[in-house]
Image: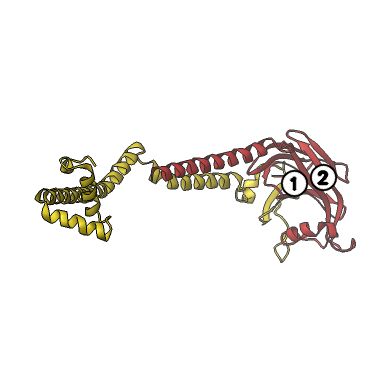
Chain colours: A yellow, B red
Amino acid sequence: MSDPTTRNLPARTALLLHAYRDGELSRFARWRFERRLRRSPELRRELSALSRIGEWVRESHAEEGIDLWDAIALRLPALDARRAEAGAARRPGIGWLAWPGAVATAAAAAVFAFQWHTPTAVPKAARVVRWLDSGPRDVMVLEPAPDTTIVWVIGPPGRRPPRGEDGKV
Amino acid sequence: MGRSSGVRARIAIAIALAGSAAVLAVRTVHAQSPGSNRVPVNVMVVHTCESERDGGVDPRARDLDEKLKKQLRYKSMRVIQQERVDLEMNQVGTVHLPDGRKVRMRPIHKDTRGVLMAVDVQGAVKLDARAPNHHKVVIGAGEYEDGNLAVSIEPDYNE
């Protein structure tokens, strides 16, 4: 016990003073020490000084704790905001473009593949037959179905195709 | 926050690469298809007759009959010849008609619209036709016996 408040006291008395203040003395020892306190003004001053120092320490600990927590608590949102700003500055536009970009790319690939592999519409009969030479004979090009083209040569030149009552050649 | 953006960007890039790779793979497979330069052609020579002496329509020509009966007048149809001619580009295939004439065909070009073919039915007609796959080009080859000959040409290849 070498604290400044008990520096002038004998070691045993200082030890007893601290034990009394901390409530560590037995009932009999406490009675005897209180009798000494009543007789010695110096001892009462030392006890009073020791009590004040304890209060200062508790107060300083309490104040320090509140200050630290408040300071940290106040700084946390600011730190988060600064980190978010720093992240946004490092990757401008990439974050929000990622998913739309992926969807657009996939859609473009799908359209490209569809166009590539979808067969073109069946052409008309006139588009199927590109060139024709029947010599002096007449010829008739018909499309009875989307998947069929008929090229029919009809008799000698200048003679209209013979048709029946049903319109057939 | 920054970490999740990075993950999203990586996923986007991965999807884009996967899509491109798929398209390229399909394109490559099609380009390297072994039969891509070959054009098998189904050829059928039929004899249409105004009498029913041949017993109506040949079962092998039922499909052709469905297409022709609305436009041409006949009562019977029999198949004289049916074969599959496997041609390379610019290779000439020849089919003989029962009266001794020849039908010559030559595929000139093939793309998504079909096969451009030059066809010569000897003594009847010459033509160029761009026929899509499975499209029948039926050509009247002139009179034969008491009816007419017709030649059906149908490209039949793997797309």
Residue nearest the observer in this picture, B108 or A155: B108
For disc 2, the chain is B
- The residue that disc 1 covers is B156
Within 10 Å of the Cα at label 1, are there few (<14), some (14-19), or many (20+) other Cα atoms? some
Three-letter amino acid code at the position of disc 1: Asp
Precedes in sequence: disc 1 or disc 2: 2
Q: Position of residue A39 (x, y in %)?
A: 11, 54
Using residue B9 as the reference point, say whether residue A144 is left or right of it. Answer: right
Q: Position of residue B63 (x, y in %)?
A: 77, 58
In the rendered structure, are the residues bearing label 1 and label 2 in contact, judged by CB atoms less than 8 Å apart? yes
Return the mark for residue B53.
Answer: none
Image: B30 above or below A49:
above
Three-letter amino acid code at the position of disc 2: Arg
Count the numbered circles shown.
Answer: 2
Co-location on one chain, circles 1 and 2: yes
The residue most toward the left is A41
Return the mark for residue B84.
Answer: 2
Examine the rendering and report whether any part of residue B122 can be seen.
no
Examine the rendering and report whether any part of residue B151 can be seen.
yes
Q: Quadrant of residue B39?
A: top right
Residue nearest the observer in this picture, A31 or B7: A31
